[in-house]
Image: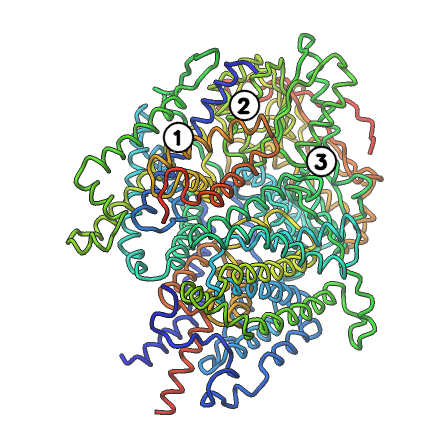
Amino acid sequence: MSRESRISVRFAGIMRATRAAPGKLDEVKRANHHPGKDAAGDGVTRRPSGNGSARRRASVRTEGATLMSPFRLLAAAVVAAGLAPSAAIAADTIKIGFPIPLSGPTAVYGKPVLAGAEMAVAEINAKGGVLGRKLEILSRDSKANADEAVRLSRELIIKNSVDFLVGTLTSAEAPAVSTVAKENKIVFIAPTSKSTILTDEKHIHPYIFRVSSNTDVEGLAGATLMAKWKDVKTVATIAPDYAYGRDSISAFIAALKKQRPDIQIVDQQWPKLGEPDFTAFITAQMSKNPDAVYCSLFAGDFVTFSKEATPRGYFKAIKNRLVDGAEVGTPDEAEALGNDYPYGIIADSYDPVLWSGSEPAAHKTFIEDLKKFTHDKYASGWSIVGYQSIYALAAGITKANSTKSDAVAKALPGLTWDTPVGSRTFSEKSHETFAPEYWGEMVKEAAYPFAVIKDPQLLPTSFPATN
Amino acid sequence: MSSSFLFNQFMGGLTTAMFLFLIASGLSLVFGVMRVINFAHGSFYMIGAYLAWQVVDWVHPTGGEFWIAAIGAALGVGLLGAVTERVFFRTLYGREELYQLLFTYALVLILGDAAKFLWGVGQLSVSTPPVLSGSVTMFGTTQPLYTLFIIAIGPAIAFALWLGLNRTGTGRMVRAAQMDREMLAALGANVSIIYTGMFALSAFLAGLSGALVTPIQSIVPGMDVLIIVQAFIVVVIGGMGSLWGTFWGSVIYGQVLSFGILILPGFSLFSVFALMAVILIVRPWGLFGRPL
Amino acid sequence: MNATVAAPAPPSRAAAAAPAEYRTVASRIPWVLIVFVIMATVPWVGTRYDTFLAGQIVIDALFAVSLNLLLGTTGLVSFGHVAYFGVGAYVCGILMKTYELPFIVAFPAAGLGAALFALISGYFCVRLIKLYFAMLTLAFSQIVWAVAYKWNDVTGGDQGLPEIPYPDLDWMSAIPGCADLSDGARFYLLSLVLVAVSLAVVHRIVRSPFGRVLTTVRDNPDRAAFLGVNVRLYQLAAFVIAGGLAGLAGALYGIFSRGVFTDYVFWSKSAEILIMTILGGAGFFWGPPVGAAVLVWLNQIVTDYTQYWSFVLGAILLVLLFGFPGGIVGGIVMLWRRLKRLRNA
């Protein structure tokens, strides 16, 4: 082959490389949706249908490309990008953008939240949808990263024209996405972010709503339980160094001081979120010999922490008197740790496995449905918040009789809606529910291959809404 | 601050150090011989961790499966390294260093997504092998047996490498390649085999350290990116291409991290990078290295 | 070692500097002006999303061009260029959000702050050779990252600084046709103008005698030193200018993204820009902007289909390294030349 034709072949090659080749990408797409890798077992759309436009865009770009100078190329690219329709135009569904961590250490919580939301959507759609229209979730992996969550939310709003935003897991992401929601006037419901910064006076706006409890509520519950140990005189804390960690610890300390002014805080450790190695923090804390520990580590961090702390005798030294308010009592966390779980600690969950007293019938149905939906043997403790959030949104849309965010934003404050664990109400002033959670000691139960909460108590029993 | 606490922090620092040494030794070796910084070294480490998990998943739990997994993972990654070098790297030798660096970065991107594709995006973990899952009381502290094992294996591997480099014929050739490769090739030695071998060995070490870290840390996507910067710091401090430099560089790094938490808690992250910058400014070839 | 080995004078200047035989009709048309006009019409012609993409392209183009001043023109391979981008983003963000200063103060301040940091770090960096230079730039960039991560009170730490306000763009209503543009679209137009001006400045610099000295330093630092050129000083100057420009890009990016986060300063972003520059063609002035456009556009398409964007990026990089070291622009120029030769033969 002559040099010239070799070069043109090569050039054609680069053009091919930049065009959306259907075959290869379909393969990747199929591989992407491999059922075996998908624990959540959802069948709901995860990607918007932008296929047609992309292909059209690519072919506009490659026509007559051979004699172009760089400038023409740039102009063509821009024009093509500009003229090709870019947003997905799905049939008349109510689109809910759902950025949530689906990879990394926090995915163990993020995935079930999404699964719960998807189940709620499936249930609502089966009954005919809301205001006669079906709901659709567009989920994205935010990697528990504020930057990523903001970028994805903006894309969901600008590119996919979502009507509402639900999601984010951590309190790093939610406040950032809240600003995007405020600027674009889109209702944003955060299922799990607990930091008070999300809805305090400085940051509240008409479009932000929170389903989970907040750090003040959590801190009060944790402090109440800690206060019960009369022989504890010194307490240490360890929490991830970001908004949630900082807020939960300060709320805990404030509540503890009120109940047990005699307790001294002797040590505070602040590993970063996603820390791969807690050893130095563990040994530093042990050297201060606290009687008990309040811990806000969660998800993958708690797994790593426990696995490193146990062989060093950390839990033994405090006689297992560790209280963790970051939902490490959920089956998801317990399963992740398996037999390495530090039995005897006190933890909480949005949704307990055992019930002290009788389990509400609605909850029994919910658990059975969830197990079927996710093809999991044991139901997650996190799915319920995703589930609750979707139902809250549906209730808001119904009450407002509109899918416009402005109307729904007016309908949601003060709205009460039903959930499998009781009804919830968004407060008028701060758009949150101050929901209590289930707390108790983590024990080994014969019927379950993972740690469960013994005699879960709904705490705090009462919460003065200070926000 | 009791002495047992200081001892504890010291041991913690040593553990971190030995892990890093295992990883960084490969990086340093490759640099010494081939004069290229392999960004993908962290990816080899990550693949080693995932492979170890995979082998443990396949092999019937008998109690010894962890060791099989560790060796298997190391060999697997070593093979991956050899193939990469033969097929791709070779063609870049005559080119600018920038291209070689970018190639290793392309590997990082590709291997990272390959791992996500094969093993998913969640967090995986491996249990400590039963024979090492106990702990020992030393100087008033509880030391897990596994960390003692790691602290012992670091110097053992360092010594083995030193033996290999200084007491064998092949080792002599490798050291010659480090000093002057053109001359070595002119003398008739098969330099390309040395290159492939060194690359494979460094990948083997990276894979081994990845496998050995699994009982202590979780296997997550992104662990390749996190570790490579730390490996760079160690190699810079100790001196690129120097085995003992890497060893002592890791020890220093480990202790700075470990005690940095106490002295300046907010600054441990900052201090290691500052240390790297200072070394580069004051003595770029590191404590034990040679000027390039 | 570098590009001088076999090739003739690097084709880094556009057609106007080439000998007369290249002065075709094509080179007389003001391509740059046409592209600028096309890009300026995006808010009216395209959707909100297109404006979003175009904004990203424009800012990345400036960032990549600033890197190319180091890489292509001066031959300095920096892995830490994102440090200056980050410094600029944080300075502008902090000034506008925390201190509520107007854009017209914050923007130049960001550039100056980044240039100052480039001066300090560059002073140490340029004294080192190749690999150590790259490592030290990486170290400084990670230092910036570590500071941004931990200095919660000022930088917001892991939370970052969300809600950076738009600059006050009401004066734009006076311009015909701009009255009913959204804030985002107005800011896009402002960025386009600022970036165009900056690019023009860089173009000037590259073509000036100063720029010639830089390429001399790139091609053979020893020979340049023998000629009496203070190599270090010129490299430092390039470093500072590149840093300042990156800071300006960072400032724009912070406002564009409605927030400044620590991820902007992580070293993987340096790698992304490096790839963008090389994809477009490091030997050409317009290479980086083309690379920026292509990469942003590709990213949008690929992420529609698959989550494995890194893999695709790595594959593109491999193709570039093994097949098209001159990047897109390099490939096109090469083809153009072949075709010209065919035609003239």
Amino acid carrying label 3: it is Ser
Look at discs 3 and 2 and give the one toward the viewer: 2
The percent position of residue B63, horizontal first and vertical second, equals: 32, 23
Q: Are marks 3 and 2 on the same chain?
A: yes
Q: Is residue A370 left or right of residue A124?
A: left
Res. B212 mark: none
Q: Which residue is mark 3?
A: A195
Quadrant into which the N terminus of chain A falls: bottom left
Q: CA distance from mark 1 to mark 3?
A: 38 Å
Most foreground residue, B29 or A391: B29
Q: Secondary structure at mark 2?
A: helix
Answer with the quarter of the image where residue A301 lies. Answer: top right
Q: Which residue is mark 2?
A: A282
Marks 3 and 2, the one that precedes in the sequence: 3
| Up/down of C92 relative to C207, above or below | above
Q: Which residue is mark 1?
A: B18
Amino acid carrying label 2: it is Ile
Quadrant into which the C terminus of chain A falls: top right
Look at discs 1 and 2 and give the one toward the viewer: 1
Q: Secondary structure at mark 3?
A: loop
Are the residues tagged 3 and 2 within 8 Å (C-beta)? no
Amino acid carrying label 1: it is Met
| Up/down of B284 relative to B140, above or below | below
Name the chain under label 3: A
The percent position of residue A225, horizontal first and vertical second, equals: 69, 17
The percent position of residue A71, horizontal first and vertical second, equals: 54, 78
